[in-house]
Amino acid sequence: MREVKKYLGDSLKVTPNFQEFQNRYSIEKKANNRIFNPGWLRLTLYTVFTCLVLAFTIQGIIKIDNYYKENEIHNGFEIVESGKKVFQNLFAKGPEEIDIAKLKELINKSTILKKEDVAVINSIKNNDNKYSIYFVISESCQDVIYIVNNSDPCIYYVFDSNLKYSYINVLVEFESLSQTSLGYSYLYNKRQKFMTTIKVEFVIKNDLKYCLLYQTNIIGEDYTLNID
Amino acid sequence: MILNKKMVRALRKNDADMFEEFYVAYYNVVYYRCYKSLESRVEAEDLTQDIFYKVWVNLKNFDNDEPQYFIRWFLTIVQNSIISTINKPNRIVFDEDIINQTSTSETSKIKYHEFKELCEGIIEEDDMDIILYHAYYDLKFKEISALMNLPTSTISSRYYKAIDKIRGKIK
């Protein structure tokens, strides 16, 4: 054995250098289009997937942000019909989620609608739907009352208000009650977009007729108003 | 290094520490095989590195824990790589005498050829390999047996017979 080693010396020997191999290996790995290496392929797919998720998330956030920016302040209850806002400028919210019988009772025993309009409501067949009443400042002169079918908000009735006063008068009364100068902005509840801060309650009187009570909160103070 | 199933399993999992052991143990065997065919130190060293890289990359594709199968698979990669290097149409054969005239390259070539000539006609080429593996690279008979796919007893008897034949000549 020794003779062979002596004869050949180190001529056919190389000292293995694993570090060098590792360095070379990583260089080759880069050169070898490592994106297709199974490990790297998995990592690449994860990265692409993460980027896509991030891109969609960012897009979503931007859209939501824009939606809120676009709809930041709206005084009015929004009903969308064929993508179009049917009415805005909601002044007050009347009773909500009432059945047809209660609706007919309120309409018949109050003076909010004209007789012919009351007949329209009375002509509605009894059903299981729920209804809401909204008081809306019209863009024309006459204030209006909306009666909305909650089951299908696209089905609604719009009537001219039969009230002897305009909604603006109610606002003025509130101003004098609270000794505060109120603008329309006061009606807005920023946390509940499209919702007014004024509620209308139908209160029965001695003669079994309903009168309207306007209720609101101005700077932390509750106010109730009966104009009838 | 005598491989066992556990080692092969670790290698298959691309265990870098295990691979380093394997690399160190088999480096000169691969180098010798490359040098024998290419007769160029630079090329042989390059190819040896390439072979180990190929082995590392393809370890996951090898699906057997049996050491003898692993060695056969490994040697097949070695053999195929050598053949494809030789058959490369645009293979650059370095003139090592020009690259470095005082390098060990020339010495290697001379020594190897001298030793080859010395063995020729006296012992078979396989026996020369056995002598080099055992007497020069310090491989155990069992390791050589795995490399050459021959029983250990055959390897040892062939070694002793062959070394006896050349002993007088290399003194």
Image: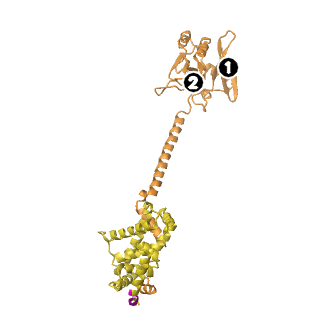
Chain colours: A orange, B yellow
Residue found at x 51% / y 43%:
A57
Q: Position of residue B90 (x, y in %)?
A: 30, 69
Q: Position of residue B49 (x, y in %)?
A: 42, 70
Q: Which residue is mark 1?
A: A225
Q: In the image, what residue type sits under mark 2?
A: Leu
- Quarter of the image containing the C terminus of chain B? bottom left
Q: Nearer the viewer, residue A80 or A171?
A: A80
**Up-down relation of residue A93 to residue B72 (above or below):** above
Q: Earlier in the sequence, mark 1 or mark 2?
A: 2
Looking at the rendering, which quadrant does residue B82 occupy?
bottom left
Q: Residues within 10 Å of mark 2 (few under 14, many from 20)?
A: many
Residue B167 magenta-highlighted: yes
Q: Which residue is mark 2?
A: A90
Magenta-colored span? B165-169
Q: Nearer the viewer, residue B16 or B139?
A: B139
Could you tell me which chain the residue with mark 1 belongs to? A
Compared across the picture, whether B132 is left or right of A122 comes to left
At mark 2, the secondary structure is: strand
Residue A45 visible (yes or no): yes
Could you tell me which chain the residue with mark 2 belongs to? A
Q: Nearer the viewer, residue A182 or A43?
A: A43
Residue A163 visible (yes or no): no
Residue found at x 56% / y 31%:
A73
At mark 1, the secondary structure is: strand
Residue A171 magenta-highlighted: no
Q: Give the overall secondary structure of the magenta segment.
A: helix
Q: In the image, what residue type sits under mark 1?
A: Leu
